[in-house]
Amino acid sequence: MEIQRARAEDAGEILTLQRAAYVSEAQLYGDPYIPPLVESVQQVRKAIETGLALKAVEAGRIVGAVRGALSGTTCLVGRLVVAPDRQGEGLGTALLRALHDEVPEATAFDLYTGHLSEGNLRLYRRLGYRETRRERMDDHLTLVHLRR
């Protein structure tokens, strides 16, 4: 498996991967309209072109991806995704570590996940992220904001 920068032409495959990876989150929260599932290929392409996007590639297949955008000295982390058949193998950890290495000028990394997403919360905490606040979005979702 190799981690490299995503290119605009990867947008379709990354979106397909993203949708597959986020189905379980949508089921967990009972909401099929979470942003990662309704994002368009044009939006993914723009995110790749205007920010930093990394992809994990194995045998020509994109098996994971993550985005980062620098805001001042803080890197805003988004859309960490791993193919459902590859989850639990350390790809998410490898992608986040690679993102940390790609943005050495960042003094902090911020991200968020849903309050019921225990696997995500364990991963982030294991990598040194600490909860900074909670934001209630509606009856079924509270976002947990974390910083490293």
Image (cartoon, helix red, strand yellow):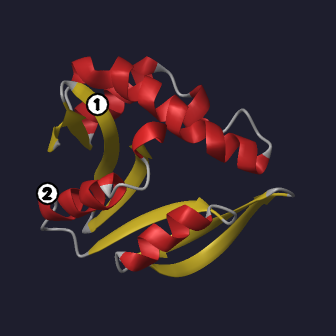
At a point 24% along the width and 41% down the height, the residue shown is 56
Residue 83 in view here:
no
Q: Is residue 49 left or right of residue 44?
A: left
Which quadrant would the C terminus be assigned to in this image?
bottom left
At a point 43% along the width and 19% down the height, the residue shown is 41
Up-down: is 22 above or below 7?
A: below
Q: Is residue 58 left or right of residue 65?
A: left
Residue 112 in view here:
yes
Up-down: is 36 above or below 126?
A: above
- How many numbered circles are shown? 2
| Residue placed most toward the observer, 61 or 39 | 61
Which element type, helix, strand or loop, lies under badge 2?
A: helix
Q: Amino acid at mark 2?
A: Glu
At a point 32% along the width and 42% down the height, the residue shown is 65
At a point 40% along the width and 67% down the height, the residue shown is 110
Q: Is residue 115 left or right of residue 50?
A: right
Which element type, helix, strand or loop, lies under badge 1?
A: strand
Q: Which residue is mark 2?
A: 102
Q: Position of residue 61 (x, y in %)?
A: 26, 26
Q: Which residue is mark 1?
A: 62
- Local packing at callout 2 (Cα closer than 10 Å; few below 14, some 14-19, many 20+) is some
Q: Amino acid at mark 1?
A: Ile
